[in-house]
Amino acid sequence: MPLVNPVIVKRHLRVDFDDNDSEIAMYQAAAESIVVEYVDRIVLAEGVALPGPDDENYDEFTMNITPAITAAILLLVGDLYENREADPDATGNVVLPKAVRSLLAPWRVWRTLDEKEVC
């Protein structure tokens, strides 16, 4: 189940035809995956109940999607949809656009490694 309603994604892209639906769905899935990986949380779609501490699927970093995370996903889908070729000027580690990082910063989890994990 996508985190963002596909109708909202198409409206954001200003696409009112169905020819590119499978391509848009692929970009949406990629953008959602990138965002979830970046914030390092389990993000649930709007209206999905968060598991309680006694639930076997409980994780303290589980959260419902927020407007900022939705906006970040929409920005990434738009970027993937409009820029279908690799950026020839990109060098080194290309990071997420600044606006996307700013939207996601409050929700990002910074985990520390135990000494055992480092060695």
Image: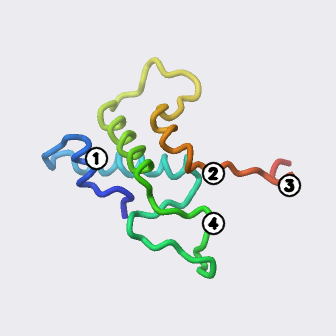
What is the number of the mark on residue 116?
A: 3
Q: Position of residue 75 (x, y in %)?
A: 37, 39
Question: Residue flagged by tag 1: what amino acid is it?
Answer: Ile
Q: Crowding at label 3, few (<14), some or many (≥20) Cα neighbours within 10 Å? A: few
Mark 4 or mark 2, earlier in chain: 4
Q: Provide the secondary structure element on which disc 4 rests.
A: loop
Three-letter code, disc 3: Lys
Q: Amino acid at mark 4?
A: Glu
Q: Are marks 1 and 2 in contact (CB under 8 Å)?
A: no
**For the residue carrying disc 1, how many other residues have a C-alpha within 10 Å: few (<14), some (14-19), or many (20+)?**
many
Q: Which residue is mark 1?
A: 24
- Which residue carries the number 2 mark? 109
The span from disc 3 to disc 4 (Cα, nearest Å) is: 22 Å
Residue 104: x and y in percent read 51, 45
Q: Which residue is mark 4?
A: 60
Q: Are marks 3 and 4 in contact (CB under 8 Å)?
A: no
> x and y percent of residue 77 in the render?
35, 42
Q: Secondary structure at mark 3?
A: helix
Measured Cα–Cα span from mark 3 to mark 2: 20 Å
Apparent side of residue 7 relative to residue 64 in the rendered image (left or right): left
Q: Secondary structure at mark 1?
A: helix
Disc 4 to disc 2, C-alpha distance: 11 Å
